[in-house]
């Protein structure tokens, strides 16, 4: 298993849509390196022939009847929105109209 | 005994006989809150007005002589990770500071059908990530047994309010031990049912392959009553399992003769506090005296459970927490430069350090080039951990271990070192990986007076075995009757 560098931390932060200042980047690099070093102990185990577990119970595809039901009222859904706008979720402009 | 000190089943008898009213009971709990909550700090939100309304409604039912459900009129506290319609639900995070759910979690719908009285929402580690409740963005909860120590976590508020008698019952959630460990540290009963037993609809997601809701109670009988109210398939949660739900009170049998109880030697290794070990060994001797056959077993992959957990849980969390982007609900940064900048600033300002650490760890473990080495590797080791339990349950009905390697530690003692904090879950994460039902029951006290918990595990959907052993142990011991000092005086002194 690999270790992690400050560049790696900046790359992962971008993927996770987080941003850190220099000091935070340094702290996260040190902490994550230590945690990953500990997690490296999993390599003591030979798992080549072991199937992965993603779900603990044997489950098959679960579907439900395709019946139209009433959704939550629009006002209730928008009640928690930071910037609702004319019945929509408002966000900063993404299309340049200039 | 004062009303707020009693169990739900004792209170139900009094309500039914109309010796007391639900309003009197609710007022008694709020008086207790008035006296001790400023020391314990278990609640993030109190809902007194609503509670008195609900209590009044329950009283109407009792006064009319209706057949009332066992939890009707009983004061209940809810971990702030469970959506409560119209009542602020924060996950102890700044990012959800003003979030008011437009719907109830399925467990809330079921509790309302019982006619419970909701007292308030309890403190927790932010997004249930932590083992001490110190990761809350709002406050530190204090362990009622020693106010300078942590209550455990992540459901520390829910454990502390039951221990402090500021609620009769509470709900928590358990991903890697977040019900069982705080129950042990606060000297109350806490149970994580089998993964899939209780609907997770409306439980704000942390790690979806592990999360499960469960109760904190003052005894095992109350635990069975809450399971009866909450278990069952829910079409709103496709991971809830369609398995018959028994009447769990039928498992409250005082007798374990002929049952086989396994003691895994890996749980008694280095790092286990000597006082904790002594309490647990004494409890095991008691179980033997009560007629169980004690069998030494081995769960050889126990030592890998933490490393596995700290890949799988953060990986799933990194996906689940992608939804907090400042668009539909929750906090949004001021004056962002553009959309991407809004996401980044909102998330960086809204999440606390531990949540960011886990999002980073999980995103890394799922990123290109690392997914096989970390996430898939952890899923394979998860299979090995599960296989250990499968083999053990060929030989025994129930497994007994300490719940936590140590009693409650001092506030601030472990916050500097994330890895040391992660080790708190060493005895609870293995069963989480295997989706097993597990309970923690009080089994004694260390020399400083802090409580110790005994963890009992069974195979999936065998909650009845767990409850039977727990009930028998409880009926033949006195530990659960002892109250913390803070609870001995009306004024909390």
Image (tube, rainbow, N blue to C red):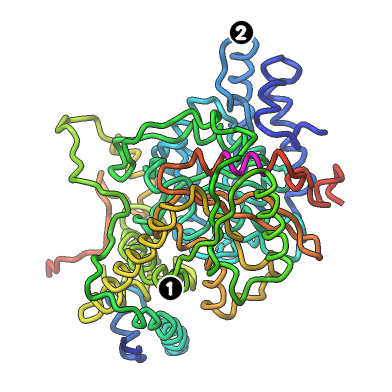
In the image, residue A71 above or below residue B368: above
| Prevailing SS of the magenta stretch | helix
Q: Chain of mark 2?
A: B
Say which element carries label 1: helix
> Left or right: A29 with respect to B57?
left
Cα gap from disc 1 to disc 2, whole angstroms = 57 Å
Residue B386, position as x, y percentages in the image: 37, 60
Q: Provide the residue span drawn in magenta.
A: B468-473
In the image, residue A12 above or below residue B67: below
| Location of mark 2 (residue) | B64
Residue B492, position as x, y percentages in the image: 83, 49
Q: Quadrant of residue B220?
A: top right
In the image, residue B446 above or below residue B374: above
Q: Chain of mark 1?
A: B
Q: Are marks 1 and 2 on the same chain?
A: yes
Residue at the (54%, 25%) spot, across then down:
B115
| Location of mark 1 (residue) | B304
Residue B92, position as x, y percentages in the image: 52, 57
> Left or right: B280 with respect to B67?
right
In the image, residue B487 above or below residue B96: above
Residue at the (22%, 64%) spot, across then down:
A93
Q: Quadrant of residue A97?
A: bottom left
Please tell me how crowded label 2 is: few (under 14), some (14-19), or many (20+) other residues with Cα within 10 Å: few
Please tell me how crowded label 1 is: few (under 14), some (14-19), or many (20+) other residues with Cα within 10 Å: many
Residue at the (76%, 17%) spot, across then down:
B19
Q: Residue furthest top?
A: B64
**Do we see residue B263 in this rendering?**
yes
**Residue B469 inside the magenta-drawn segment:** yes
């Amino acid at each position: 298993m690999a270790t992690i560098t400050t560049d790696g931390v900046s790359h992962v932060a971008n993927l996770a849509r987080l941003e850190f200042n220099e000091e935070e980047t340094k702290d996260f690099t040190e902490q994550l390196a230590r945690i990953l070093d500990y997690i490296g102990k999993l390599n003591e185990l030979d798992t080549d022939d072991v199937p992965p577990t993603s779900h603990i119970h044997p489950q098959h595809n679960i579907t439900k009847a395709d019946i139209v039901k009433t959704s939550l009222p629009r006002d209730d859904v928008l009640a928690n929105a930071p910037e609702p706008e004319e019945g929509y979720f408002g966000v900063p402009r993404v299309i340049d109209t200039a | 005994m004062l009303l707020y000190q009693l169990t739900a089943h004792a209170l139900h008898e009094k309500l039914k006989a109309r010796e007391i009213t639900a309003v009197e009971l609710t007022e008694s709990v709020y008086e207790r809150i008035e006296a001790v909550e400023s020391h314990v700090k278990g609640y993030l939100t109190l809902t007194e007005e609503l509670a008195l309304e609900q209590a009044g409604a329950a009283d109407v039912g009792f006064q009319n002589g209706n057949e009332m459900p066992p939890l009707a009129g009983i004061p209940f506290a809810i971990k702030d990770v469970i959506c409560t319609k119209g009542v602020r639900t924060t996950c102890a995070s700044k990012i959800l500071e003003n979030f008011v759910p437009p719907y109830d979690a399925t467990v809330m719908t079921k509790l309302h059908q019982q006619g419970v009285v909701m007292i308030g929402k309890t403190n927790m580690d932010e997004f249930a990530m932590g083992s001490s409740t110190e990761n809350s963005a709002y406050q530190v909860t204090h362990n009622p047994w020693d106010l300078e120590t942590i209550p455990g976590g992540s459901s520390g508020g829910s454990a502390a309010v039951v221990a402090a008698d500021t609620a009769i019952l509470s709900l928590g959630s358990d991903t890697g031990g977040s019900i069982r460990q705080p129950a042990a540290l606060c000297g109350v009963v806490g149970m994580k049912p089998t993964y899939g037993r209780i609907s997770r609809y409306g439980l704000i997601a942390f790690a979806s392959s592990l999360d499960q809701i469960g109760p904190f109670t003052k005894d095992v009988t109350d635990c069975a009553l809450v399971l009866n109210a909450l278990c069952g398939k829910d079409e709103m949660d496709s991971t809830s399992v369609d398995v018959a739900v028994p009447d769990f009170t039928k498992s409250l049998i005082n007798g374990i003769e002929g049952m086989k109880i396994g003691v895994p030697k890996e749980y008694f290794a280095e790092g286990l506090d000597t006082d904790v070990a002594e309490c647990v060994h004494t409890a095991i001797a008691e179980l033997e005296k009560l007629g169980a056959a004690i069998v030494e077993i081995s769960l050889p992959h126990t030592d890998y459970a933490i490393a596995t957990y700290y890949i799988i849980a953060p990986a799933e969390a990194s996906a689940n927490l992608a939804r907090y982007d400042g668009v539909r609900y929750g906090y949004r940064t001021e004056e962002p430069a553009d959309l991407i900048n809004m996401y980044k600033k909102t998330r960086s300002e809204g999440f606390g350090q531990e949540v960011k650490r886990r999002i980073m760890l999980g995103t890394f473990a799922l990123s290109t080039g690392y997914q096989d080495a970390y996430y898939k590797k952890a899923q394979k080791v998860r299979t090995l951990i599960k296989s250990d339990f499968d083999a053990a349950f060929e030989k025994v009905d129930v497994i007994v271990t300490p719940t936590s390697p140590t009693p409650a530690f001092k506030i601030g003692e472990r916050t500097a070192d994330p890895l040391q904090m992660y080790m708190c879950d060493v005895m609870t994460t293995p069963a989480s990986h295997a989706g097993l039902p597990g309970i923690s029951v009080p089994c004694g006290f260390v020399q400083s007076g802090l409580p110790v918990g005994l963890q009992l595990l069974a195979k999936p959907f065998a909650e009845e075995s767990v409850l039977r052993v727990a009930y028998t142990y409880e009926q033949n011991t006195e530990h659960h009757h002892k109250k913390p000092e803070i609870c001995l005086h009306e004024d909390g002194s």
